[in-house]
Image (spheres, rainbow, N blue to C red):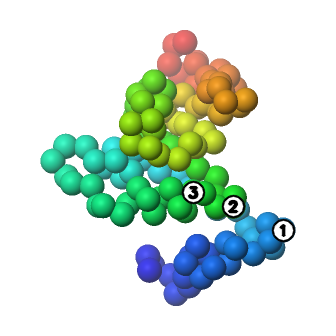
Amino acid sequence: MSGNDQDPEWETGSMDRPEKERQSVLLCCDLDRTLIPNGISLESPEARPRFRGLCAHSAVQLIMVTGRHLDLVTEAIDYWQLPMPQFIIGDVGTSIYALTDDKWRPWQHWAAEIAPDWGG
C-alpha cells in the first residue's frame, strides 16, 4: 500500500458496489516511463493489463498528462492498447483536449486563459 492504512477501493471490492454508493476516482497519469516504456527500461509484464482493468471500472475517470502533442498521445494509445482517457493534458500543460462524440476537441477556455502569457 502506498502511504495509507486502507486498501484502495479496487482492491477491496467496493468498486463493485452500485454506482450511487461509490465515489468517483480521478486518475491522472503520465505516459512515458509511467504507462509505457521509454528508453532502456523494460515494461512490467502485467502493468498494462492491470491498468486497463482498473480503468474499465465506471467509477474511474482517466486523464493523461504528458509533454506530448495530441497526435503523439493518440498514436501511443493505439500502439500500446491503452484505455481511452476522457481528457488529455498535452504539450507540457499548454493544451487540454476533451473527448466529445469520439473526437478530441481543444478546450478553448484554457487556450484563451494562457494565451496572454504565451503571446498568443
> Gap in Å between the C-alphas at discs 3 and 1?
18 Å
Compare residues 8 and 112 and report the one nearer the observer.
Answer: 8
Q: Is residue 61 left or right of residue 75?
A: right
> Gap in Å between the C-alphas at discs 1 and 2?
10 Å
Above or below for 41 versus 85: below
Q: Circle 1: is it few (<14), some (14-19), or many (20+) Cα within 10 Å?
A: few
Residue 59 place in picture, x, y as percent: 69, 61
Give the residue number, with chain letter if any, for mark 3. Answer: 55
* Circle 3/circle 2 CB separation < 8 Å: no
Q: Residue furthest bottom?
A: 5
Which residue is drawn at the image coordinates 58% and 50% (left, top)?
62
Give the position of the N terminus as an image quadrant: bottom left
Mark 1 element type: helix
Residue 39 place in picture, x, y as percent: 19, 43
> Gap in Å between the C-alphas at discs 3 and 2?
8 Å
Give the residue number, with chain letter if any, for mark 1. Answer: 20
